[in-house]
Image (cartoon, helix red, strand yellow):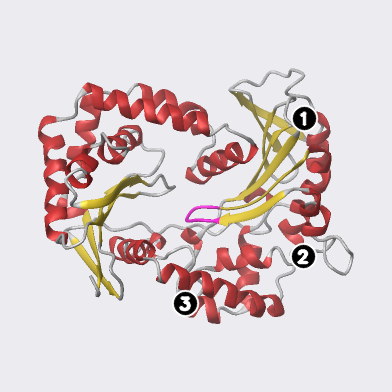
Amino acid sequence: MDSSTTPSTPEIAGVSHVQTLDGIHEYRLDANGLQILLAPDPTAPVAGIMVTYRVGSRNEAIGYTGATHLLEHLMFKGSDNFNKEKGGTIWELIESKGALVNATTWNDRTNYFEVVPKEHLPTAIALEADRMRGAFIKESDRQSEMPVVRNEFERGENSPMEALDKQLWALAYEAHPYHHSTIGWRSDIEKVPIERLKQFYDDFYHPDNATISVVGGFDPVSTLETIKKEFGKHQKAPAALPVMYTEEPKQEGERRATVKRAGETNMLALAYKIPRATDPDMPALLLLALILADGKTSRLYRVLVDVAAATDVTTMCYQFRDPSLMISYVTLAPRVRHEIIEKKIKQEFEKIIKKGVAKKELARAKRSYRSYTASRRDGPYALLSSLNEEIAAGEWTRFVTFPNMIAKVTTKDVQKVAKKYLVDDHSTVGYFIGKNS
């Protein structure tokens, strides 16, 4: 760790500098444990701020699935010092000034962000600090926002991809909360009591369970002072943060799910259990996914799309805090049977397991990842979002160190992870069947 103090890593009383990596400076607010990441760019005309809470659908259970997402909606309804009565809502104060304002929820995290003209950064920081502990969590707001969230749920139900994906995760995970989709189950969305949402808010929304990231055009000294002033008002969580200790039991056989809906779309999804994001095997797994289904020269594209057996194919290597899934999704061409596509995919997997991958395939995958790495710094929101996902996965420094790990992967490493994880007994197969197809 670099603990030196330079003009870009100023000393602020009550704020400890932890480390600096590749122009990103990590600090800790001594009074309450808030993690702070600063990535200044003096040439940028705007600044971005994101508060990442280490809470998502992973921390929910039956009865309040979707709580994180519903709270996301409620936390835009005002807070102690920023509300309609005081004429200072987030929309009036900064969105009207040209700011990008939003929030997102997923399995391992929730974030709230603003990208603003840099002169409005102090206001954005004050807004986020106020709703960290002063958000209005009202029954009247729950009643007005519940139909909005339910409509989101219903739109997902009408999407073949989302409907199949929800069933796939629900079958692949029996015990672990990844079983539940982020938006939650319909009955929980409709019926969760406001008291349960307040309890969830009081359990997790504290400075010692959060990171504030600031990027773009800003002065590090004054920004740290503002963060200290606004977030320093909050104490650490009064009790230990609830621990999600449930582990998924070992899968001991292939699982299958079928979804039948009106429509003409047919899809297939083939999922395999993989380790958590911070596992040493993850770089090779990510490159395996790119070799399988990244672009027209990829393995699955050539054996499925090029021969008109499918219209689209993608492979996702989900990098989560806990063991996750690598999933290949295929949209079938008309009159093509699911069983044929499944057989073709598994044959391609078997080729990699037995013969490995070519050096040129691996080189192409690495070039694709380098392009993706460059895009992660393409503007304030891209950088904030990228840091956010690494925080959720367990450690923000992966943003800096992971590309080097990718560069070291060999063809033998890819073949090794294919043998280790592409195991039928650890797989879940999903068919979406359009009844009109």
144 or 283: nearer the viewer: 144
The amino acid marked with disc number 1 is Pro
181 or 316, which is in the foreground?
A: 316
Q: CA distance from mark 3 to mark 1?
A: 45 Å
Q: Which residue is mark 1?
A: 220
Q: Is residue 107 magenta?
A: yes
- Residue named by callout 3: 186
Q: Residue at x 51, y 43 (%)?
A: 389
Q: Quadrant of the C terminus?
A: bottom left
**Horizontal and vertical percent for residue 353?**
14, 36
Amino acid residing under circle 3: Arg
Side (left or right) of 325 relative to 341: right
How far is mark 3 from mark 2, CA to CA?
26 Å
Residue type for callout 2: Gly
Which of the 4 image quarters holds residue 359? top left
Instruction: Kindly report the secondary structure that dominates the magenta region of the rendered protein.
Output: loop
- Residue at image location 72% in from the left, 56% down from the top: 132
Residue drawn at (89%, 65%), measured in percent from left and top? 86
Q: Is residue 186 left or right of residue 99?
A: left
Camera-near label (3 vs 1) is 3
Q: Which residues are magenta?
A: 105-109
| Dot 2: element | loop
Residue marked by disc 2: 78
Above or below, comparing residue 391 to residue 334 in the picture: above
Q: Is residue 302 above or below residue 217?
A: below
In percent of width and height, residue 217 lies at 75, 31
Q: Residues within 10 Å of mark 2 (few under 14, many from 20)?
A: many
